[in-house]
Structures are given as C-alpha cells and as structure tokens.
C-alpha cells in the first residue's frame, strides 16, 4: 500500500426512510430496481413499482412508527463509518462514508464527498457479508453508473463478499453464546434468519445461499451449537426462498420447543427488519405460542465487528 495515497471507503447499504413522508418514495426506489425484484416485463417495472409502493406505504409507515417513525439504518451506518475511519487511521489516510442504494445518501452524494476530499482511489465495502445480485450487485452497478455520470475517473476496488471473515464470525459467535446463556440452562432452538430472495436468482447462479451456509458452518465450528436457516422480508409476487421465519417458529412450537434464539445473520445493524419484523412481530408470534424468545444483539459499531471491516479494507489495500 502506498502510504501517501488518500483512500476513500464507501460502506454500501440498502438505506431506509427517515420520516413518514419518505416511505412511499423509498419503496418506489426499491421496487423500481430490477436487480432486486423483477416485476413483469422491463417496460412495466416502474408502473408496477408505483402501484406496489402506494399500496404498501400505509402499512410500512405504521411499522416504522413502532420503531420511532423511521429507519435507523443511516445513523447506524454512519456510526460504523466513523468507527472504521478511526480504526484505519494507523494504516494510512482514509475517508469512510456511507453510500445507500435506495435512500440518502445516494451514491452520487457519497461520491461528491469523495471528490471534494481529493481521494486517490476508492474501495467499495458492501455491508452485506453474503453476495447477491440483489444487494451487493445492485449497489455496485449503481455506484459505477454514478461514477460514469460524474466522470469520476478513480480506481475502484470492490470487496464482494466476506461470509467467513474471522472477526465477523467471532463477533456473531459472541452474541450466540451470550444469547444461549440468557436462557439460564434451559433448552433453546437456534434459528438463523436471513433476508429472503426470489428463488429465480439462486437458480440463475446467485451464491447468496451458499455464502449463508458458509457463515453458519463457521459459527457452528466455533459455538458447537447447531441451528436452522430460515428467511424473512418477502416483498413481491414471486417465489421466495423459504422456509419463512414465522413458519419455523410455528414448527418449533408444534414440536414442543420452549425457547427460540434468533440470529439475524444477514443484517449487520439494527433496522426495520430486526427492530420491528423480528423483535416485535415475530416475538409476539412466539410468545403467543407460549415460547421464550430472544434476538441476538446487532453488530452495529461493536469494536469486534469494526475490526472485521478494517481487516477487509487493509487486505484489499495490501
């Protein structure tokens, strides 16, 4: 690594509406992206996206209202960016910024900050440990398009996936161990919950499920605890990966299970999928079935997790 270089690191993430009035335009951006969900023929994508966004907005606003009115994902990602910049300081000159796909700060906004800072090259670090065309792929495609639009001719390197990164696995293992301990010796079912994807993407070669299995295998090697993989957050008229988390909760109850520990394996910070969907909606389902329910702590800006991100950046720079 050239220690004289100024390196810009972009933390790629989904983004989320910060106020109730942001919800519909955020959903429109999300459903307009053919990389995340294909709605009819390409020329119909935006038309169908507008219909879905309009229909879903009231329910989504109600869900966000239960976690404070908006998504915390921007604030959490910016905390991660500041912590990562501090962690990288001994290794050279780095500027770290968040870069969202469907809400502010969009790629163009983040790139403008990088240009103003005078960086010599860019590293894109998706906050998706497991590669999918719908997450990392879409974000990187958008980032490159915005660089072309802005005529920003900087070298760009992408860290595509990191399902078995050492400190990442250690941080998750710590949370699993403490989560199991919170049941004070009672028997507990460990459930890994990942964001679902259209089955078609996997059939076309998307490595997302394989990456999830790699993370789980690494965790089981450390914790010696077996878990089951399920999915959440389906959102559209296509076939999605399963089983769904609520189906698994109901199955565990039917089998006589008394306690569930959920690990949100594909989420590296708190946002609506963890704070509302898991910790309110699915917690209520489990408790209504007479089961104890815990959700492992989010990684957020935990020093062990930030160390994993710093290691990824240093490795890419080497």
Image: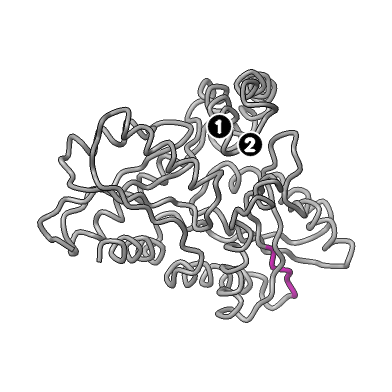
Q: Residue at x 16, y 50 (%)?
A: 6
Q: Residue at x 51, y 56 (%)?
A: 298
Q: Residue at x 39, y 56 (%)?
A: 159
Instruction: Tell me, yes or no, whether the highlighted magenta stretch contains residue 298.
Output: no
Q: Position of residue 157 (x, y in %)?
A: 32, 52
- The N terminus lies in quadrant: bottom left
**Would you name the residue on which mark 2 appears?**
37
Instruction: In this rendered view, identify the residue nearer to me: 24 or 159.
Output: 159
| Magenta residue span | 187-191
Name the chief secondary structure element in magenta: strand
Q: Position of residue 8 (x, y in %)?
A: 25, 47
Instruction: Describe residue 157's horizontal placement relative to residue 233 as left or right.
Output: left
Instruction: Describe residue 206's horizontal placement relative to residue 91 as left or right.
Output: right
- The C terminus lies in quadrant: bottom left
CB contact under 8 Å: marks 1 and 2: yes
Residue 83, labelled with which disc? none
Q: Residue at x 65, y 62 (%)?
A: 192
**Would you name the residue on which mark 1 appears?**
33
Is label 1 in a helix, a strand or a loop? Answer: loop
Q: Quadrant of residue 276?
A: top right
Q: Position of residue 155 (x, y in %)?
A: 25, 47
Q: CA distance from mark 1 to mark 2?
A: 7 Å
Q: Position of residue 115 (x, y in %)?
A: 20, 36
- List the single residue furthest toward the left: 4
Q: Is residue 145 above or below residue 284?
A: above
């Amino acid at each position: 690594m050239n220690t004289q270089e100024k390196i810009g690191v972009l933390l790629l993430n989904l983004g989320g509406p910060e106020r109730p009035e942001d919800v519909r335009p955020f959903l429109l951006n999300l459903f307009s992206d053919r990389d995340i969900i294909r709605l009819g023929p390409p020329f119909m994508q935006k038309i169908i996206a507008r219909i879905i966004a309009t229909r879903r907005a009231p329910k989504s606003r109600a869900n966000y209202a239960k976690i404070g009115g908006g998504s915390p994902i921007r604030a959490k990602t910016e905390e991660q960016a500041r912590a990562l910049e501090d962690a990288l300081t001994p290794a050279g000159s780095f500027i770290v910024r968040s870069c969202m796909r469907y809400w502010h700060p969009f790629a163009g906004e983040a790139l403008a900050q990088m240009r103003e800072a005078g960086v010599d090259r860019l590293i894109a670090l998706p906050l998706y440990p497991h590669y999918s065309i719908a997450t990392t792929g879409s974000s990187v495609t958008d980032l490159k398009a915005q660089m072309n639009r802005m005529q920003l001719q900087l070298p760009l390197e992408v860290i595509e996936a990191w399902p078995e990164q050492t400190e990442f696995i250690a941080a998750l293992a710590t949370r699993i161990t403490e989560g199991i301990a919170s049941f004070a010796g009672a028997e507990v079912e460990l459930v890994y919950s990942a964001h679902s994807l259209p089955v078609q993407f996997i059939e076309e070669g998307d490595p997302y499920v394989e990456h999830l299995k790699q993370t789980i295998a690494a965790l089981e090697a450390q914790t010696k605890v077996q878990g089951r993989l399920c999915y959440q957050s389906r959102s559209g008229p296509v076939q999605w990966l399963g089983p769904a988390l609520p189906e698994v909760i109901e199955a565990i109850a039917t089998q006589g299970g008394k306690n569930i520990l959920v690990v949100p394996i594909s989420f590296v910070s708190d946002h609506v999928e963890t704070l509302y969907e898991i910790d309110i909606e699915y917690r209520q389902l489990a408790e209504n079935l007479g089961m104890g329910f815990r959700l492992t702590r989010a990684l957020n800006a935990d020093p062990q997790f930030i160390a994993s991100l710093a290691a990824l950046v240093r490795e890419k720079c080497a």
